[in-house]
Amino acid sequence: MSPYLQSKGQRHYLLWQSHAFGIMNDEEVKLMLKTPKLLKHKIILSVLYDCGVRCFELRNIKLADLDFRRKKLHVRVGKGRKDRYLPLTDMLIRGLKKYISAENPQIWLFNGQPDEHGKITPYSQHGIQWIVRQTRNDAGLEKHITTHTFRHTYATHLIEFGMDLPRLKCLLGHALIETTMIYLHLAQMGRSEPFGPLDRLYA
C-alpha cells in the first residue's frame, strides 16, 4: 500500500468522487471536442481538457494570462490557493489564436453578457455547464459528463502517458498528494508518452 494513502476511508471517498464524474476515453474526448458548432464552445472544451482547469479557473482566465511565446497559461486562483502556470500545447495555441482573432474577446478570454452597467463580465458558470451538457447530448453520449469530468480525464490520461505524481500535483493545483494519488487507481498503467493530451490525442 502506498504510504501516501494512510486512510482507508479517504481512499474510498476519493475513488467514489472520481467514479461519480467518470473518465472519458480517447474517442469520447474527440467526439466532445468536434461536436460543438461554435468555435467558442470548441475552445472552452479544449481548454478544460488540455489544461485540466476547474470551472471557476476557466472563467477567470484573462487574455493577459496567456503567454504564447513561452507556451504558458497563468492560472490565478485567488485567496487561499497558490497561482500556478500550465503548459499550452501547440494545437491549443493555434485554436486559441484563431478564436481570439475571430471573436475579439475583451479582458477575459471568454466573455459573458455585460452586466446592468455595461461592464464586461466573464462567461458564467451556468453557461459553461450548459455547453458541456448540450455537447454531450448532441454527441449522443450516455456517460455522465460535467466540467469536472474533463479535469478527471486530463489527470488520468497524464498518468497513463507517464507523468509522475509530484508534477501532476502541481499542474492540478492540489494541496495534498493524497488527492492526486486517486488517479493511479483510475489510470491504465504502462504507457510512457509525454504529457500534452490534446497534441497526443490527434497525433
Image (cartoon, helix red, strand yellow):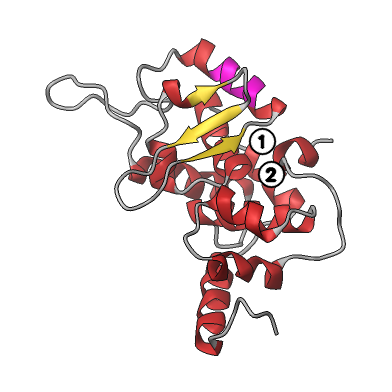
Q: Does 139 appear above or below 44? A: below
Kindly indicate the quadrant of the structure image that contains residue 117.
top left
- Residue at 33 percent across and 31 percent down: it is 122
Q: Does 25 appear above or below 5? A: above
Numbered range of the magenta stretch: 93-99
What residue does disc 2 label? 31
Residue 108 is left or right of residue 14, and the answer is: left
Residue 8: horizontal and vertical position, in percent?
56, 88
- Residue at 46 percent across and 15 percent down: it is 103
96 inside magenta stretch: yes
**Residue 34 - label:** 1
Q: Out of 40 and 105, give the one closest to the viewer.
A: 105
Alpha carbon of mark 2 to alpha carbon of mark 1: how far?
A: 5 Å
Residue 50: horizontal and vertical position, in percent?
63, 40
- SS assignment for the magenta stretch, majority: helix
Q: Residues within 10 Å of mark 2 (few under 14, many from 20)?
A: some
Name the outermost residue toward the left.
117
Residue 59: horizontal and vertical position, in percent?
39, 37
Q: Out of 30 and 13, give the one closest to the viewer.
A: 13
Q: How many marks?
A: 2
- Residue at 70 percent across and 69 percent down: it is 184
Quadrant into which the N terminus falls: bottom right
Residue 199: horizontal and vertical position, in percent?
76, 35
| SS assignment at label 1 | helix
Quadrant into which the C terminus falls: top right
| SS assignment at label 2 | helix
Residue 131 is left or right of residue 193, and the answer is: left
- Residue at 79 percent across and 65 percent down: it is 188
